[in-house]
Amino acid sequence: MNKTMKSSNEIINNATPAQDMQQAGVAVVKTTAERIFREAYGWDSSWQEAWLAAGFETAGLTPVRMTADFGQQFKVATSAGEYTAETSGKMRHLTERGAELPAVGDWLAAECLPGERRARIHGVLPRRSKISRKAAGNPVREQIIATNVDTLFLVTSLNYDLNVRRLERYLIMAWNAGTQPVILLSKADLCDESFRLQALSEVSLAAPGVPVHIVSAQTGEGMEQVAGYFAGGRSCALAGTSGCGKSTLTNYLAGGHVQRTSDIREDDSRGRHTTTHRQMFEIPGGGVLIDTPGMRELQLWEGEEDGMSGAFSDIEKLAGNCRFRDCTHNREEGCAVREAMNDGELDSGRLSSYRKTQRELAFLERKEKSRSAAGRSAGNGKRDQRKERRDKNWLHED
Ligand SMILES: Nc1nc2c(ncn2[C@@H]2O[C@H](COP(=O)(O)OP(=O)(O)O)[C@@H](O)[C@H]2O)c(=O)[nH]1
Ligand SMILES: [Mg+2]
Ligand SMILES: [Zn+2]
């Protein structure tokens, strides 16, 4: 064989020759299935690098991707189909905060038990993106919605659902997460042309620079563009209130009835919570989609990225022209933001939403700070040490 040519086996399997020999009996079939699986689920050369750097290959582990979360137990996709999985005792022992447990979307290092269709999880690859919100009823706990999502579809239906203030919150969540938001205005078949145009213009103002598509899972309108986001095995997720049509879109894109959908109650136009778990589905042409339950109220969680700048780029750009650098856009002379508002270029509702969200995030940050300060003064240096060790163990086990 030509030396520069690689067999598909070599491209994905970096095992030593000795390990290759060991597996020789099943190598070909196994690696073809493995290659198809990894391509479909978005494995690429930088995942491979992270995998090797973490030492998972030498530990004899297999990459699998978490598809569903049922609390203690969860599901993972493997080259041999879906397995039930749980974390290893050691990993559970090292875990104190829920946020560091595997989440839907994670690439995990697994010990597969094919006879039982079970997997034991020993590690998590560092995440590329992480969609979080504040856990309900707990001011300082993060709840991860999904990880490693390239595109987050924010769905809002064109019948009764449209609410730009709520959309702004979803956009902050997307930008905080490090994902690309895309807005889907769903159920286009239910509204007339003038309502569409109005919705489109309102949404474009609330979401500067964000792609917007008008879609219908009923007629298929706009669905080709949506399908384009999965090209090259990319990962997408759906977010939006209950009843806006997320599971119906999932069924359309997955090419079958994979998710239950629900009828909207006529009285309040709200869907029932038919989708109760976050779950990932494979898209026939490659790529995956994560469907999520509706969120009654989206409580923001400050991420590593600056979501405010992403979601309110128009206001921040204007603020760059205010005379004073620390302008609060209240009564200062030479305030470009107020000027734009007076000229009708900037909606006053949007400015007050910007301010309100800023206050909310500042409050959250203060809470988080005082909590970690309290933790330290209570002699929790030990916990920090444990956390550090844990990160090492999970992410860089070499
Ligand atoms: N007319 C119409 N109805 C839709 C469309 N998409 C979803 N629906 C309906 O909206 C209701 C809620 O859909 P579902 O997918 O369960 O919403 P979810 O809660 O966001 O997952 C169901 O009765 C669907 O049949 C659409 O494109 N057009
Ligand atoms: Mg649903
Ligand atoms: Zn100003």
Image (cartoon, grey):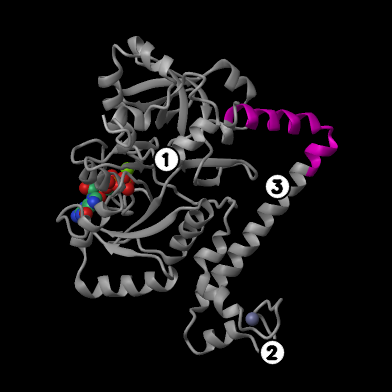
For the N terminus, the quadrant is top left
The label on residue 333 is 2
Instruction: Specify which label sits upstream in the sequence, 3 or 1.
Output: 1
What are the residue bounds of the magenta stretch?
A: 373-394
State if disc 1 and disc 3 touch (CB < 8 Å).
no
* Figure check: 67 above or below 195: above
Other-residue count near label 3 (Cα within 10 Å), few / some / many at <14 / 14–19 / ≥20: some
Asked if residue 202 shows in the view, the reply is yes
Other-residue count near label 1 (Cα within 10 Å), few / some / many at <14 / 14–19 / ≥20: few
Residue 381 magenta-highlighted: yes
Kind of element beneath mark 3: helix
Q: Give the CA separation, mark 3 to mark 1.
A: 36 Å
Would you say the beta carbon of the disc 3 residue lies within 8 angstroms of ligand 3?
Answer: no
Query: Which numbered disc, 3 or 1, marks the residue closer to the eye?
Result: 1
For the C terminus, the quadrant is top right
Residue furthest to the left: 219
Q: Which residue is mark 1?
A: 45
Residue furthest to the front: 2
Residue 168 percent location from the top left of the image: 47, 63
Which amino acid does the dot numbered 3 rest on? Glu
Instruction: Say which residue appears at 62% left-offset and 26% top-offset.
Output: 393
Q: Which residue is mark 3?
A: 368
Kind of element beneath mark 2: loop
